[in-house]
Amino acid sequence: MTGIFSTMSGPITNPLIVIPALDEAETVGEVVAAVQVAMPGCTVLVVDDGSTDDTVAAATQVGALVASHAVNLGVGAAMRTGFHYAFRNGHDAVVQVDGDGQHPADQIGILLEGLESSEIVVGSRFGSDHDYPIGFVRRLAIRILSRAVSIHCKTRLTDVTSGFRAAGPRAIRLFASHYPTEYLGDTVESLVLAGKVGLSVGELPVAMEPRQSGRPSQAPLAATMHLARATFITLQSFIRRPPQGSQALVGPTR
């Protein structure tokens, strides 16, 4: 493993890179290979979320472990599978990396370094020298959601919908059983849940690239509907009580 990293509870000795993937055969092999170069010795787990193309073959050909869902369950369910694997196999950090090429592998170390002062570290597309292209309405949605979640987590966040993030040991214990799987659960609601049980959340600017495959929805109407839906779901997550037993998994609030 390149570099020496620590979590708030000690040095990182066994990190896991989790790559949720749905029909990413065109890019997932390159993503896995890049991670292996940037983080030699790290375990890479691709969670195939019901792909209908050759995603599994592309991942296994370059040496990744693969866990497969029989049907598409969403990114939240894929990450819960990843966290469950991490918990069962003694990993002390989890880094989520998208399979579409957005998250440069050479930025993983930045997130792992952040675990020394925060138990969850979000990689922000904003605030670095890299200008990430994003539409006005979508940027507005991210800004509104980030301000709301910042208040809840008691820290300034700018990119709560970012899927490029790292989690330490206490977060792994929580998310192995209770990672939210609903719409926005894998991003916004997971941070809200973390705040409710006393996990510290931080953010660091990272460079990201546009999607290398697939076609994101950028139409103004779709973005507006996304903003309305996201706001509603976020309000629900603030009101919802933490899952029963979740506080016991992470222990006393620090």
Image (cartoon, grey):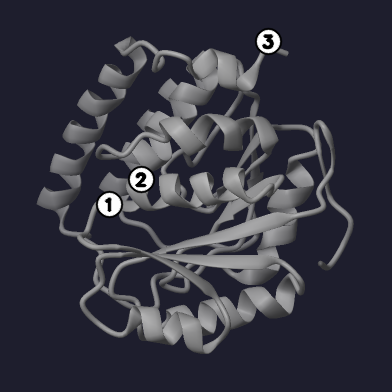
Q: With 12 as the anchor, is 235 left or right in this view? A: left
The kind of residue tagged 3 is Pro
Q: Which residue lies furthest to the front in this view?
A: 88
Q: In which quarter of the image is the N terminus?
A: bottom right
Quadrant that contains the C terminus = top right
Tell me, for residue 83, which label it has, or none.
none
Measure the alpha-carbon separation of dots 1 and 3.
31 Å
Instruction: Tell me which corner region of the image, top left, top right, bottom left or bottom right, holds residue 253.
Output: top right
Q: Could you say which quadrant of the image residue 6 lies in?
A: top right
| Residue placed under numbered mark 1 in the picture | 74
Disc with the residue nearer the chain's start (2 vs 3): 2
Mark 2 vs mark 3, CA separation in Å: 26 Å
* Above-or-below relation of 46 to 221: below
Q: Where is residue 172 in the image (x, y as percent from the top left)?
A: 59, 38
Residue 50 can be seen in this image: yes
Nearer to the camera, 214 or 10:
10
- Determine which residue is flagged by label 2: 76
Q: Does residue 137 appear to the left or right of 210 in the view shown?
A: left
Mark number displayed over residue 252 = 3
Q: Which residue appears at 68% of the width and 49% of the height?
A: 91
Percent position of residue 139, x then y: 36, 46
Q: Residue at x 67, y 60 (%)?
A: 108
Q: Of the residues shown, which amino acid type is indicated by label 2? A: Gly
